[in-house]
Amino acid sequence: MPDDPTVVTLVVAARDGDQHAWNAIVERYAPLVWAVCRRHDLSRLDIDDVGQSVWLKLVEHLADIRDPAALPGWIATTTRNECLRVLRTSRSREHAEHLAEPEGFAEGGFAEIDQELERAQRQVALRVAFRELRPRCQELLSQLFQEPRPAYRDISATLGMKIGSIGPSRERCLAELRRCPALAALIEADGPGREARRA
Amino acid sequence: MTSIADIRWDDDDELLAFLDEALRTEGEVPPDFVAAGKAAFTWRSIDAELAALVYDSEREPALTRTQTADLRALTFASAHVTIELELTDSGLLGQVVPTAPARIDVQTAAGVTASVTADELGCFTIRDVPQEPFRLRVRVDETIDVLTTWITR
């Protein structure tokens, strides 16, 4: 997993009491916590419980995180452990009451956690990169996500952009996205060969 | 699930699809879940032990609930104390076990909203229970300082 220099900056600032840095950490990784909880099939009530525990633990451990770059992994693992705690509590009750056999979920899911972490890292990088784009690029790309995808004619009307410019602008904006440091670091770590071939 | 090694970053359509997925995933996370995470920063200086929720009647399957629906029983446990709570419309009744004249603070993201002292049996009553998520900080002398996880009504 590539190191993300901004994570280190955020952790160091949050450690010094910077609420904005903390907010940025939460905004970045709340989707990871959420996704891991969903994967464990937790109710909203349980997800809230897990979320609170994870963030509180992180607040408590900010001071002694030795390697801030490892933060996403720490969050994913802690969330998983908290999910298992919640499941154990409800499962042992069910067991005692002979209501239901414990289900086989959440057993040996470390490979799954790795995948979730990988996906979360990729998504964080993409979101950070997207927000660094020029507003014009963000608007255009947002249009292209619409389902069903609007006709270029409609995009042209919405954005006041020539139809002939949409294709080339899309290409330029995506190239810009790839160059944003957060994403560039990920692409670099992923496989420099491919990008080198491209260049 | 696509492994990161399989991603063709130079493919515009693929990049766009992944960007779409990334923004969509973020959009699926409820704002109040994120807000609660941000609020957790308030407690960074508190040097308290965490008491985990070990029982919540609201999580019991409906058939096995022994209490009436308007009473919610909660139990928090740490290494040193157990905190038993009964939450009703009219307030929060609690007991600290082992019994001790504990001081109890009710905390929300905004700060401490109420402080009460438990009697010699460790019992306490909180009349004004916050509507927003809250937690209890329970202190006994200088030796015990415990913080429950967040309680959402």
Image (cartoon, helix red, strand yellow):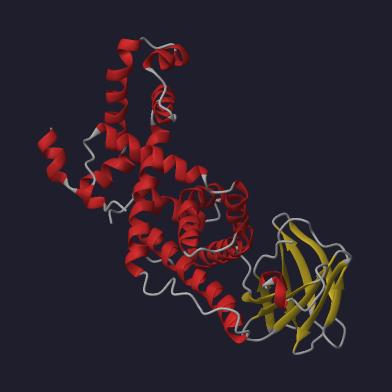
Looking at the picture, how far across and down is residue A78, in whole percent? Answer: 46, 68
Q: Quadrant of residue B126?
A: bottom right
Image quarter hosting the N terminus of chain A: bottom left
Q: Is residue A77 left or right of residue A175?
A: right
Examine the rendered structure and indicate whether residue B48 appears above or below residue B144.
above
Which image quarter: residue A159?
top left
Q: Determine whether A185 is above or below B121 in the image.
A: above
Image position, residue A26 (x, y; %): 51, 52
Residue in the image at 61% along x and 86% along y: A96
Q: Left or right: B64 with respect to B4?
A: right
Q: Residue at x 40, y 42 (%)?
A: B21
The answer to whether one can see residue A179 in this image is: no
| In the image: residue A59, left or right of residue A78 | right
Can you tell which quarter of the image residue A137 is in?
top left
Residue A20 in the image: state x and y as whole percent.
54, 47
Residue name at image x 37 percent, y 38 percent? B19
